[in-house]
């Protein structure tokens, strides 16, 4: 048993019966663990916004938590508006996501600090980014 198997088993024990997923290659351990767990039904979605919206809707209709499986941090970012809505409605949508090392950038944007393209580096009240 590996960490993915244990995570999926514990989620099933906690009452999760559905996983809405848009996985990538870095989530294959979790996909394999879902395949082994008969108590959780995996539903594939083609976009993270669809996946998170479906999980939110499922949770609201069944009054049970619905797991989402998204591809890395950017996949999480694609679905964050629906996760925010679920959070505001107090709908439990557990969303584990993996992260990979970005070898070309010493401070990956999904880990730390503003990058030249984030709003923290832009001029006040505009989306025009500063030169420095």
Image (cartoon, rainbow, N blue to C red):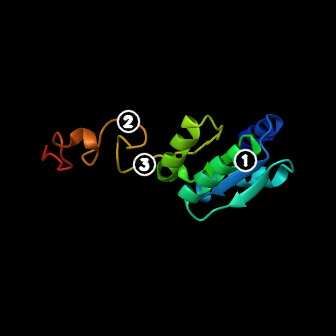
Residue 86: x and y in percent read 58, 41
Local SS, label 1: helix
Between disc 2 and disc 3, the foreground one is: 2
Q: Which residue is mark 1?
A: 61
Local SS, label 3: loop
The quarter holding residue 109 reads top left
Q: In the displayed image of the protein, which residue is found farthest to the bottom?
A: 46
> Mark 1 or mark 3, which has the lower sequence index?
1
Q: Which residue is mark 2?
A: 112
Local SS, label 2: loop
Q: Which residue is mark 3?
A: 102
Residue 13: x and y in percent read 83, 35
> Mark 1 or mark 2, which has the lower sequence index?
1
Say which of 122 and 103 sits in front: 122
Q: Gap between marks 1 and 3, in whole Å?
A: 39 Å
> Mark 2 or mark 3, which has the lower sequence index?
3
The quarter holding residue 23 reads bottom right
- For image coordinates 25% across by 38% down, the residue present is 120
């Amino acid at each position: 048993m590996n960490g993915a198997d244990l995570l999926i088993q514990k989620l099933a024990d906690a009452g999760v019966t559905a996983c809405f997923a848009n996985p990538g290659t870095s989530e294959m351990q979790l996909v394999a663990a879902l395949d082994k767990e008969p108590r959780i039904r995996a539903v594939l979605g083609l976009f993270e916004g669809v996946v998170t919206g479906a999980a939110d809707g499922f949770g609201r209709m069944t009054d049970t938590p619905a797991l989402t499986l998204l591809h890395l941090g950017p996949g999480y970012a694609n679905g964050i508006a629906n996760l925010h809505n679920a959070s505001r409605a107090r709908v439990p949508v557990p969303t584990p996501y993996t992260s990979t090392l970005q070898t070309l950038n010493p401070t990956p944007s999904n880990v730390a600090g503003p990058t030249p393209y984030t709003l923290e580096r832009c001029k006040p009240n505009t989306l025009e980014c500063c030169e420095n």
